[in-house]
Image: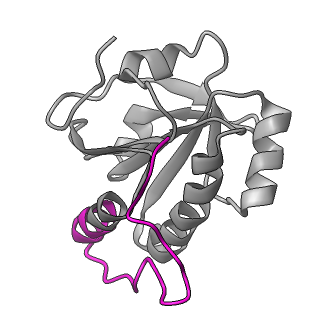
Amino acid sequence: MSTVTAGQKAPLFELQGVNGRQHSLPGALARGPLLAAFFKVACPTCQYTFPFMERLYQQLRAHGGQIWGISQDNVPESQRFAKECGVTFPLLIDDYPHKISRAYGVKYVPTLFLIASDGRVELTSDGFCKADLLKIQQALANHLSASPPALFLPRDRVPEYKPG
């Protein structure tokens, strides 16, 4: 199982969200780029990262920014995670045997894939990486012709990296 890397075609998928709605990657990409974030509810690094991804979502959603959290847990646990972390972007369920996570070669969580509209992976990141999140923010802003504010605020005490 090798991880999908930048420049490769993203494996296509369709998953159900915690709200019962179906989400398809081709449908999302028809509307623009998508940040897919694989996670587990009990992962401390995921719990740390997702509020920053929510901030990014709030900055870019009016411009068409799309973020999906892809949970390796069940619906009730994922709904609790969303509430505790303040996540409003769609959370999709990739339950056991984690077919989509395996297709992407996810070894650690969180693992992020910025997928361009043409279906190619543009950027990847695992764990919490401040520099990678800033690159993702800039790439999405460029795709969406947006000028978002700073992702990290002076009051945020943010490490450069936290492993997943």
Residue at left offset 40%, top offset 84%? 150
In the picture, measured across the screen, residue 22 lies left or right of residue 24, that is right
Q: Inspect the magenta stretch and tell me whether residue 120 lies in it.
A: no
Whole-percent x and y of residue 7?
A: 14, 35
In the picture, measured across the screen, residue 43 lies left or right of residue 149, that is right
Tell me the quadrant of the picture where the N terminus can be found: top left
Furthest toward the bottom, the residue is 154
In the picture, measured across the screen, residue 14 lies left or right of residue 141, that is right
Whole-percent x and y of residue 133?
A: 36, 61
Is residue 121 in view?
A: yes
Whole-percent x and y of residue 100?
A: 48, 20
Residue at left offset 72%, top offset 59%? 85
Q: Inspect the magenta stretch and tell me whether residue 144 lies in it.
A: yes
Colouring:
one colour
Residue nearer the viewer, 149 or 3:
3
Magenta segment's dominant SS is loop
Which residues make up the magenta segment? 136-164
Residue at left offset 43%, top offset 25%? 106
In the picture, measured across the screen, residue 59 lies left or right of residue 121, that is right
